[in-house]
Image: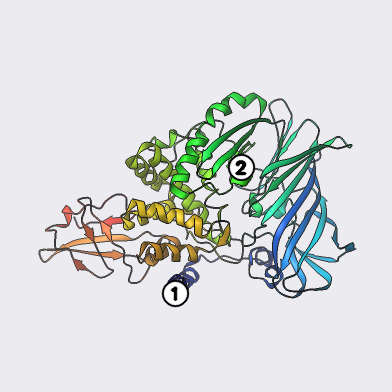
Amino acid sequence: MKALRAVFTFITMLLAVATNAQKLVSSFSKADSLRGDIHSPLRTCYDINFYHLNVAFDLAQKNISGSNLFKFTATRDFKRLQFDLFANLNIQKVEYHGLQLPVERLYDAVFLTFDREIKAGAQDSFRVYYSGKPHEAKNAPWDGGMVFSKTADNSYWLATACQGLGASAWWPNKDQQADEADSALISINVQKGLTAVSNGRLVAKKELNNGYTRFDWKVENPINNYAISANIAPYTQISDSYNGLNGKLALNYYVLPQDVEKAKNQFKQVKQMLEAFEYWFGPYPFYKDGYKIVQTPFLGMEHQSAVAYGNEFKNGYLGRDLSGTGWGLKWDFIIVHESAHEWFGNNITAKDIADMWLHESFTTYAESLFTEYWYGEEAGAAYVIGQRNLVQNDKPIIGTYGVNSPGSGDMYFKGANLLHTIRQLVNNDEKWRNILRGLNTTFGKKTCTGTEIIAYLTKETGLNLVPAFEQYLNYTNIPTLETKNEGGKVWCRWLSDVSNFEMPIKTSDGKWLFPKTTWTVLADYNNASQLKIEPNFYINFKRDP
């Protein structure tokens, strides 16, 4: 642990300097800071233990009403805290031991003042009652919010998609990724004839006297706020099970009645997905909560144990291969990609959305590992290499910390190719697999920082990976290997934004080169034209004609 802490401290200093130096100039507001500051004393003073979200939907009016119970442990003495709820939603009252507590609102932040000092270590609770018209998504999941839709037979169809936008767009919570509830109960009240599906397992269904039915879903694992979902439709349930590494895993699929046969056929891929990812990453993290797919009126989202699915029961990404190689048409993109988030995003969660590459880079890379598991190493490599055509190199992958600001969308394809390159540096596939599994053991069901993950990878590989991560994550350029013929010799050097950048590189004939940012001689070559780089390394190659 001492060695890991030393590496962690070193990486923190390097990445902080690079990040501050390279961020594009942006203007952030007070509202951004209130939402994104995970270190605010008004938020760190309490640790969320449990939520009981109890909500009713008026689908005709697109209204929501209900309450959320916050159970927490005080981390220090305090009398005032912050939680979050979008300003367009009304707070009726906040109850605390029979009292109504005063609240102040500023943008989407809510400040709650107690009638007494809460002592460090105390376990306590309060309940927020609220209502209103939640933000409606126009192009989910990219813009976020509630998705109000209708089925082909004109039945109501609702779903949520709030990653980035924030779960506080539809329910009150401590809206940051750094603090997850250890468990949760989600009660959804809907008009009779409809089914409400959320995370975890259905523990109760009750017909109410007001024409509504309440569905109670219990989550027995830590869960981040944006992964908590509400899905409402005239669903048909398909049940199955999978014998995995941790025993029998319950599989349930909730689909529209007219799509049952399509779903039965397409969702056979779930077991293939689980087999591949349990091989690469270790056991599915949420056996107690089961695994579900829920059909939604938008493409998809990684809602924990309740994957949102709208890929039209097609292979590929709506029938398209993002890699351009053909391999992406062998499997359903949403089943594979969104389910991979159960390991990276839901099991391992970034504290700050600026580090969302921990979710998306690893999950996009998981697509190639799935391909490799079922179709071979060459197929997996071809798939991830094919995605390089989608890299924009527009801005750094790491976002701005403390203001709820993710980095470039390159966190998907560029990030996946960074990890594929790191695998080449490790040069030992079994070791690499054990490292990926170790990540899910060491950081599983926790929140963490990108710096912590890089420190772990550096320690476990025994390699100095800091320059590579710094270059690929904090700068738009990827490193360029430059070669030239001079004085009857072949010379090479790295061109990079990181000073003294070093990264070994492998040639297509199996030789390892160790370039620096200064010119060095390649003794094994007579002419630069002989030099070809192994394509699994994601770099630019500039060769002297």
Q: Which residue is mark 1?
A: 6
Which amino acid, mark 1?
A: Ala
Mark 2 closeness class: few <14, some 14–19, many ≥20 residues within 10 Å:
many
Horizontal and vertical percent position of residue 100 = 88, 63
* Inter-mark Cα distance, 2 to 1: 38 Å
Query: What is the secondary structure assignment of the residue under circle 2?
Result: loop
Q: Which residue is mark 2?
A: 290
- The structure residue drawn at horizontal position 36% and vertical position 67%, both measured from the top left corner, is 464
Q: Is residue 98 above or below residue 367?
A: below
Q: Earlier in the sequence, mark 2 or mark 1?
A: 1
Query: Where's residue 360, x and y in %?
Result: 50, 52
Q: Quadrant of residue 428?
A: bottom left
Q: Position of residue 30 (x, y in %)?
A: 68, 67
Left or right: 293 with respect to 146? left
- Residue at horizontal 67 percent and vertical 57 percent from the top: 181
Q: Could you tell me which quadrant the C terminus lies in?
A: bottom left
